[in-house]
Image (cartoon, rainbow, N blue to C red):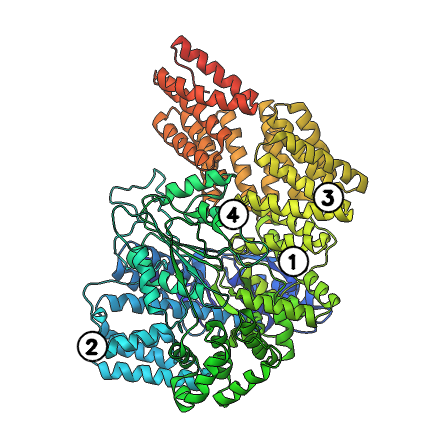
Amino acid sequence: MAGVHLESRDRAVGFTFQVLGELKVFDRGQGTVPVTAGRQQVVLAALLLESGRLQNCDHLIRLLWAEDPPETARTQVQICVSRMRKTLAAAAVEAAIETRPPGYVLQIDDEALDLNVFRRTVAEAATLGGEGRTAEAAALLRAAVGLWRGPCLNGIPSDALARVADHIDEERLAATESFIELELSLGRHHQLTAEIARLVGDNPLRERFRGQLMLALYRSGRQAEALESYREGRALLMDELGLQPGEDLRRLEQAVLTEDPSLRLERPAATDLRGTGRPLGAPAADLPGPDAVADEDGHPPARAAVPRQLPVDTADFVGHGQLVAEAEGVLTNTSPDRAPGIVVVTGRSGIGKSTFAARVAHRLAESHFPDGQLYCQLRGGRADPVDPREVLGRFLRALGLPGPAIPDSLEERGEIYRSMLADRRILVVLDDAVGEEQIFPLLPGGRSCGVLVTSRARLTALPGAHRVTLDILDEQGSLELIGNVVGTDRVGGEPEAARALAAAVGGLPLALRIIAARLAARPHWPLASMVQRLADERRRLDELTHGEMTVRASLSLTYDGLAERDRTLLRLLSLTKGSTFPSWIGGPLLDAPDAYPYPSDLMEPLVDVQMLDVAGVDATGELRYGFHDIIRLFARDRLAAESDEGERRAAIRRVGGAWLALVCEAQLRVLGTRYFDGPAARWSPPADHVGTVLGRPLEWLDTERENLSLTVESLAQEGEDGYAWELAVNLAPFFETRGYLDHWARTHRKALTAVRRSGNLLGQAALLASLGSLHLNRRNLPEARLSLTTAVGLFEELGHSKGLGLCRRDLGLLERLSGHDTAAMDLFERAERHFGDGDPWARASVLVQRAVILLRRGDVGRVEAELDEALEIWRDLGYLGGQARVLQRAGQLHLYRGQPADARKVLTEGLSMVRDDGDVIGEGYLLHDLGRVHARLGELTQAGSYFHRALAVREGILDQAGAASVRVDLADLSLRGDDTAEAGGLLTDALEVFGRLGMAEEEERATGLLARVAAGGAVEGR
């Protein structure tokens, strides 16, 4: 347990490396190891923060010299690293700085660094919290926070590292908030009051601490002090930021004023650290029952996914109280003979349909739909609405179905979707639907779910739906909305101007919010001045109160008040295609990589006036932004009117180059190499920001796959085929790893159309080669052969050696799958010659592929040598997926040699790797091989367990061929136990698959076993 670990480390010197405070290094005797101040400190700190990961030398140079590095910069970094190695070695510190082109990797034990222990302990506390062990979770979090000895990397002489350290300090505050929340739920408010007051004093703008102080004071019988704390916080926010407190704090103040019974501590409860919002210890549909047990490897049973996808609730929502109650009544109807409650919210653009839906959904989420909430922006107001097949794919992933298990057809996806929702209470929110055809496939089948749809159309053909039509706000509602944003004092001070302002925009909520935001940002402006500005706008737009024209007038007013750079950014942001986009994208749009310390600073002026929305924070910690559809249309109009084609085209290329640079860097971090380089120019975001965004490359891909796919399609449509094909091809390895085969196919089809139109031969060859690999994944061998052979012809015409190597390697795999070992070996050898010595990663992939054939031929010595070489290559490159593949082959080699104990050891190591990497396909293969090992050892019960787990994995990802292969081994076990009936059924099922897919070798083995079944005899194990 981490708690025991922390108890033994109650002093900072319990660690070898300390960054939670000043940077310090300790030797085995816990004496301080001197680190030369300046550059050596910066280099060591950078390596520690990314221990175990490659740190590019260029990145270290940028940390040391933010601008104008000297010509000797690389040499000076090498000297710093060399001296650091000597310092650590002289002190006998257990650490190694490895040189790994293009940089360095610091290898240390996880427990040697206080930051690693802090993060692991927080994660363990979350697990305890999820199990309802609130007191233990709180104690563990408090101990974790106790590891800090001051601000992270205090005094480090690097502005870039200091910014990273600020983000780490944020983790400390978040953990502190969590243990305070937990201890409050345990009734410790009397003991906590003074401590929380100190935290509020140190962090006066942090609303969660202030809310916790108010709650502790109230529960301690100090209601007046709780309210005074709120008033102090409100005054501070208004003075410092010109903002009102957030909705949670305002709601808490009201609850204190009214002595709301919900503030009393009825029983211990605390927020679930996993972020579900469910009280700790409360029963939950997604937790395993009391009879659930871990598997024989000690892995806990799987939990059903509980999606929480709702967008943020709008704090300044006003009006429509009767309609809210009406919609809630439909969605919560418990009548036993009712169909699924369906509410359709309709109204004109800008009327607040999405805001209304978010409010209703949040009000009902926990009380009536505890099993989760699904949400999708369907883009009905745009030229490219989301296909329901794609929506079902997203929903199935959110509900826990692995990517490879999601079928291709709309009908099959719908069947699985309805089955997964049949007995669960889930709310489905479908925002901005284009028509009934888009909605029908997304409706649940059972009565327990609810559906909330927004649309510009009335959707009258949707059976059983209850329609809610939103209209403009009346004067009272308009004034309330303005007051929520600018303050009720200003509205009360100019009542006539406030009423004129509401009338000028026709009570349209979007227009009211935008204008009020501008007034809030300029407290010295009287409301009457804004009324006059709106009057001036009417000269340009005569029909101010007609539909979108009202919105356009309001947006023009706000737009005209922006700085020139902000106006340019707003126009260029309209080129983005995704529903949300990351903060860094403003840099390439403006060609300003270092304009601000934080990329989000470019976006915030637009957020301030509500021309952009903050859509949330993704898994990498990156702020995300989004447009309201009407504002996006307005920005496109301004782009057409004010930006020339050259500016637009250059921005498109820079954004394409930025996505490409990030994808290639992510490749380097995951694969240890770059997959396929082309001539498209890169545009690199700031290096320290890239390091943050790509800290977990595969998670980043999951977050950005919509934007990446849409960017490929947009580049293809814009005629930028060079960027389109290169981005598509370099995304393919990630799509393969995660099982996003739909994205792989769609991006390549779009890009292929573009390169064929332009006559780009390299792009055609690369895309066809990648499509050949996709067809191999789907076991569509004829299509794979056609794509790969066509690509070979193009690569030969271009004289492109690596492309030929990739194609012939995959053609070799095709021949191997077809049972043509001699042809496969010839192709593997030709691929190896194409790769040469300059591409060790690709060579390793050939060595692993042909090991199967060499082992069948009994060439054991060559197999062993080549697997050793492949493992060394992929270890040097840091490619975990490749290492797991080699270990699988090594396990098969040991089994062939009659060394099952050695096979079990390496296969178990490989299984751990693929599980850590989330590779469900690799897990299926390794479980199957481990079953064969136990069968060879005569441990038939364990073998059967592994085979059944492998079968479950293969069936879960719809791998018919792999599942059939596992059934043959299960049949073998059944025959050893004289259960010929069971064996016969398994073999019959397997032979049907083998015959249909042309798997001759497997079919031959299954046929032999079936003959034994007919003879009634047992079969010896292989």
Q: Is residue 493 left or right of residue 556?
A: left
Q: Residue at x 47, y 46 (%)?
A: 392
Q: Pick the residue in front: 1015 or 503.
A: 503
Q: Pick the residue in front: 798 or 27.
A: 798
Question: Mark 2 against mark 4, which lies toward the viewer?
Answer: 4
**Residue 661 tag number:** 1
Quarter of the figure with the N terminus: bottom left
Q: Earlier in the sequence, mark 4 or mark 3?
A: 4
Q: Earlier in the sequence, mark 3 or mark 2?
A: 2
Above or below, 596 relative to 709: below
Which residue has dot 4 on it? 390
Question: Disc 4 vs disc 1: Cβ atoms closer than 8 Å?
Answer: no
Q: Residues within 10 Å of mark 4 (few under 14, many from 20)?
A: some
- Residue 26: image x %, image y %? 46, 65
Q: Residue at x 43, y 89 (%)?
A: 496
**Residue 764 tag number:** 3
Question: Mark 1 against mark 3, which lies toward the viewer?
Answer: 3
Which residue has dot 2 on it? 220
The Cα–Cα distance between marks 4 and 1, rounded to whole angstroms, is 27 Å
- Residue 307: image x %, image y %? 39, 53
Q: Pick the residue in front: 509 or 608.
A: 509
Element type at marker 4? helix
Amino acid type of the residue tagged 2 in the rendering = Ser
Count of numbered circles on the image: 4
Amino acid type of the residue tagged 4 in the rendering = Glu
- Residue 636: image x %, image y %? 63, 66
Q: Residues within 10 Å of mark 2 (few under 14, many from 20)?
A: some
Q: Earlier in the sequence, mark 4 or mark 1?
A: 4
Q: Residue at x 56, y 84 (%)?
A: 535
